Amino acid sequence: MEHREEQKLEAARAFAVKGRIKSCTPYGSGHINHTFLLVCEDNGQEYAYILQQMNHDVFHDIQGLMNNVQEVTAFLRRRILESSGDPDRETLNLIPTKDGNNYYRDSQGNYWRTYLFISGATCYDLVEKPEDFYQSGKAFGRFQCLLADFPAEKLVETIPNFHNTPIRFASFQQAIKEDPMGRAGMVQKEIDFIRSREEEMGLALCMQQEGKLPLRVSHNDTKLNNIMIDDATGQALCIIDLDTIMPGFSIFDYGDSIRFGANTAKEDETDLSKVSLSLPLFEIYTKGYLEGCEGRLTKTETKLLPYGAKMMTLECGMRFLTDYLQGDVYFHISRENHNLDRCRTQLALVADMEKKWADMVRIVEKYTS
Ligand code: ADP
Ligand code: GN1
Ligand code: MG
């Protein structure tokens, strides 16, 4: 979607930013929102912000979502202050509108929010240094612990059934049946790959229904580019993209990080020979995550960590393929067949995990016994 300049500026002007607007340019590589770096100037000093147009097609209850973000960031801010951290860099900070609201609805009906820009830190699309991945594991583990005390009843479910894999499978089957773009015939191999794994998809939900797997307040979108790594210290600084914080499974938070970060290729790599599960990266993240969780996971949760990794990868591949079949209506794409390419990396990664399953189990056991 092209952003009309005046729409973006109308939104930027609505927020209580410092000084005059100097520039507002597209930023980052998220698949859902439209993100801009907003630079303002006041008395010769520059101030940077992140301006985001929230994806109203994906998130139907913007007010509920923004209340979640407000509550969670206020909670994190208190915790960071208690531990003498830097609350302006270690959590997202919302900038209110000039009217005191936490989001702005523009004249075209689009929804916007603004955060303080966190400078001197980077979001990676691929692990460059294993230490960064270890740090992000620790940070997501700690985040999970921290949220254990967060009152879950304050949260709205921003996307119902977000990681309900059987429901995702049903949508996938529906997309094949409807096949609005006439694409299903070209991806039979991928369809068969996913269908043949249907039986595995309901395990987590079944275990939860049987009281064997706890629902926790979780992030639900823990990929590497949703965490900022401090350029100076190399430490994980801030967890971002809080749109999907809601009750979920720890094994899926862990698994989504593995899906993205322990892949030796980018999520949209077209050369599938580059895709594989790096066992050293799998190990280092597992170590970091379990350290960050400080023993709070149950035995069942730790045992299911490899399953969480495989399921998040399979589910994500299935979601990309569903979107490809539906005509690329959900994930932003920047080239033809982008969602199909993304689906193929995920399925190749699932296949590699299956080959390396015994090693994955052994590594998890090494850090839990
Ligand atoms: P999406 O849901 O589209 O992934 P994100 O909230 O993850 O949107 O933001 C997209 C990208 O913008 C991030 O990957 C990150 O690079 C950058 N970003 C988001 N918030 C901030 C922030 N407060 N400071 C600096 N960069 C940010
Ligand atoms: C989306 O918003 P972003 O780009 O961080 C998606 C995740 C997928 C991911 C795949 C709200 O994450 O669920 O795993 O793309 N977010 C939403 O890269 O659907
Ligand atoms: Mg993101």
Image (cartoon, rainbow, N blue to C red):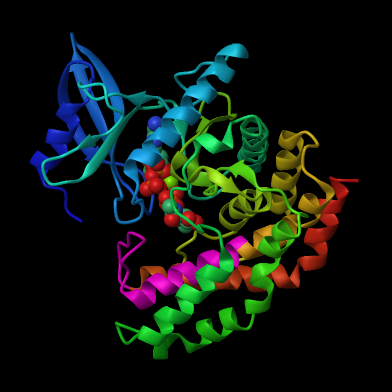
Q: Position of residue 69 (x, y in %)?
A: 43, 34
- Using residue 198 as the reference point, say whether residue 176 is left or right of it: left
> In this rendering, is residue 221 above or below 8?
below
Residue at position x 19%, y 17% in the image: 41
Q: Position of residue 60 (x, y in %)?
A: 33, 51
> In this rendering, is residue 114 above or below 65?
above
Q: Quadrant of residue 48?
A: top left
In this rendering, does residue 227 appear at all?
Answer: yes
> In this rendering, is residue 59 above or below 294?
below
Residue at position x 8%, y 40% in the image: 6
Frontmost residue, 209 versus 216: 209
Q: Is residue 317 magenta?
A: yes
- Using residue 338 as the reference point, say whether residue 111 is left or right of it: left
- Using residue 355 as the reference point, say whether residue 97 is left or right of it: left
Chain part drawn in magenta: 312-336
Q: Position of residue 96 (x, y in %)?
A: 29, 23
Kindly give the residue lying farthest to the left in the view shown. Answer: 6
Q: Quadrant of residue 179?
A: bottom left
Q: Position of residue 127 (x, y in %)?
A: 57, 47
Q: Quadrant of residue 360?
A: bottom right
Residue at position x 44%, y 19% in the image: 88
Characterize the magenta stretch by its predominant secondary structure: helix
* Quadrant of the displayed image that contains ligand 2: bottom left
